[in-house]
Amino acid sequence: MFLPVVQTLRARFPDWRLTLVTAPAVAPLYAADIAAADLLTVEPETLKRMWHYPAVFGGWWSDLRRRKIDASLLGYDQSSVAHALAWLAGGSPRVGGAGLRIRLQLTLTHGVGWRQGWSIAQWNWEMARALVAALDGKDWPAEPPAPDLSIWSTGRQLHRTA
């Protein structure tokens, strides 16, 4: 659901450094668009429970601060811990889904509520639109494209080096 967002961000803003935190099982989908050093993986359940382990949480916080994050985009399904890390990373804007049942909803600078008739892919797409508008105001396509999965059929290099 989030792959078209990442692919479009990469295509439209090739000079942006994109850091992605994702589950290990889906990380290979993003490897063509995110540099290996910027593709961070964590199991979703580990992320959700990270607040139980202050040293682990602190390590993630420290790593994200060191990266000098300028902005954060949180998919609709991100936990309170993900919202806390985005907030503590220091970047603004912080865009995510509005109206969710998470404790740290107010850490967002821009919330995008789900609308009747939207798919999850469209909701993530609209969050990306809000992020791009907050950063530079460039136009964002109305509809998400189908994800480019050609990496699996063409044998393209799996990791970007830049």
Image (cartoon, rainbow, N blue to C red):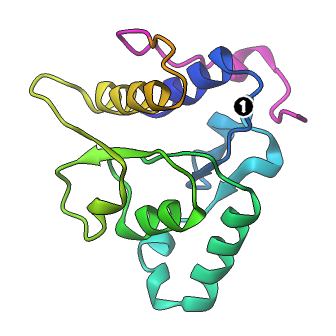
Q: Quick check: 108 above or below 135?
A: below
Crowdedness of circle 1 by 10 Å Cα count: few (<14), some, many (20+)?
few
Residue 105 percent location from the top left of the image: 27, 60
The verdict on residue 105 being magenta is: no
Q: Most extreme residue toward the left, as rendered?
A: 116
Q: Position of residue 32 (x, y in %)?
A: 74, 29
Which residue was labeled with disc 1?
Answer: 16
147 or 105, nearer to the observer:
105
On the rendered image, what quadrant is the N terminus found in? top left
Vertical comparison of 31 with 5: above or below: below
- Amino acid type at circle 1 is Trp
Asked where in the image residue 83 lies, by quadrant, the reply is bottom left
**Picture mark count:** 1
In magenta, the rendered stretch is 141-162
Q: Secondary structure at mark 1?
A: loop
- Residue at the image position 19 percent from the left and 24 percent from the top: 118
Q: Position of residue 35 (x, y in %)?
A: 80, 40
* Nearer to us in this view, 115 or 88: 88
Is residue 145 toward the left or the right of residue 142 in the image? right
